[in-house]
Amino acid sequence: PREFRIVVLPGDGIGPEVVGEAVKVLQAVSDASTEFKLNLETHDFGGCAIVKHGEPLIPTTFQACKEADAIILGAIGGPQWGVDAKVRPEPGFLKLRKALGLYANIRPANLASDALLEYTPLKPDRARGVNMIVIRELIGGAYFGPRKEQNVEPEPDSAWDTMVYSVSEVERITRVAAQIALAANPPLEIHSIDKANVLASSRLWRKVVTETLTKEYPQIKFDHHLVDAAAMFIVSQPKKLNGVILTENLFGDILSDQSSVIPGSLGLLPSASLPAPPSLPGPNFKPTPGLYEPIHGSAPDIAGQGIANPIGTILSAAMLLRYSLGLEKPAKAIEEAVRKVLDTTESGGHGLRTKDLGGSVTTKELGDKIVEVVKSLL
Ligand code: NAD
Ligand code: IPM
Ligand code: MN
């Protein structure tokens, strides 16, 4: 069988709890196949690595990530390493993203199942049929521009961050959005989000997005929205933004958490971070390494209770199989299993919910059920 090296980074807080369930799903997929084998290896990363080794991204973890076919991550961070701590996990994460060139962050936000309509805080008619894919630029903008902390000479009473974008950085993320839009039939519309009425980097963004799409992808419909109004539309008329939402790093961070309100929980949404436009499974598939994680954080408020929703991480495992390994069949099986396990409307639906969705099943019970259904679908 073909062998794949998968690096598992459980991280902190609920990270190990949700990753544990995704690992069970991946292991079941591997065990059921004679054609491929997933070799899963776990490494310290984040706050737990600070505790054990004094730094968030230690050399062995870094090396394993560079060599892996794909990485699955839970979440990092927590109150032990708050904003005033001397050593914090988040910079290690930014270093990893940058070093691996993971500029394309894909965050789909849709209802895994219409059964979730009872949990959306929106009016069900507004949430039904929402299908947004946030494409967030991940290694530029204010996260990576020159930065100065307070209490550093010669201006000890000021601190600053700089939002910087180059033409080529905007071109390449626009091409990712375009290829995702074209993978759907009919092609999705692209909604580019910026703050071009104020920011110079946004004026460059808007110009480059327009030029790239017009020249290279004339068949794709696109428009531009200012980020403040877009934030309002996401929760008032989300279908107005159906399609691909293309935006820069910081806006994408905020808007993707906000989009999780539509299906009803932050715990549901997966993501892929890639160093190239995704190649889709099929005869022309080109393997691309990538990092896969739920969009949520370490949820210190519920960590250790065994009640976190593992679905965002399990759906991230499905994205891993599809985008990094080209294994569409098990990816689909996982997505189908998640739908069946949540569903109450179809026959054979199980209607299981963790607490964030008003239910009382544990992380592990939900994971076990998903594994069972995945096995039956493979
Ligand atoms: P968070 O995403 O951890 O939690 C926000 C809220 O959503 C909390 O009430 C939490 O209980 C809930 N929630 C999140 N995931 C859930 C799940 N799977 N099931 C049920 N409920 C869930 O955001 P925060 O509290 O602002 O941040 C906590 C820490 O996580 C910070 O240190 C932050 O830097 C870090 N963080 C890490 C990542 C990552 O590793 N990719 C992402 C976001 C935040
Ligand atoms: C995310 C997180 C990270 C980000 C933090 C932990 C650095 O919020 O992946 O969405 O802001 O990118
Ligand atoms: Mn975030």
Image: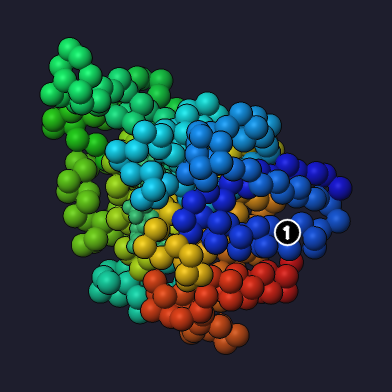
- Against 368, is 21 above or below? above
Residue kind at label 1, given as amino acid type:
Gln
Residue 247 placement (x, y as % from top left): 33, 39
The residue shown at (21%, 62%) is 236
The response on whether ligand 1 sits within 8 Å of label 1 is: no
Q: Is residue 89 above or below residue 327?
A: above
Residue drawn where x is 39% and y is 58% of the image? 300
Per the image, label 1 sits on a secondary structure element best described as helix
Q: Where is residue 61 in the image (x, y as percent from the top left)?
A: 62, 35
Q: Which residue is drawn at 22% across and 49% down?
A: 230
Residue position marked by numbered label 1 in the rendering: 27
At 40% from the left edge and 37% from the top edge, which residue is drawn? 88
Q: Residue furthest top?
A: 154
**Residue 66 seen from this side:** no
Q: Which of 271 and 177 is in front in this view?
A: 271
Q: In which quarter of the image is residue 296?
A: bottom left
Crowd class of label 1 (few under 14; some 14 to 19; many from 20; radius 10 Å): some
Q: Is residue 69 visible to us here? A: yes
376 left or right of 240?
right
Which x, y percent locates residue 234?
Answer: 26, 56
Q: Which residue lies furthest to the bottom in this view?
A: 347
Ligand 1 image position (quadrant): bottom left
Task: State the residue in front, 285 or 214.
Answer: 285
Work out which quarter of the rendered image holds the C terminus and state it.
Answer: bottom right
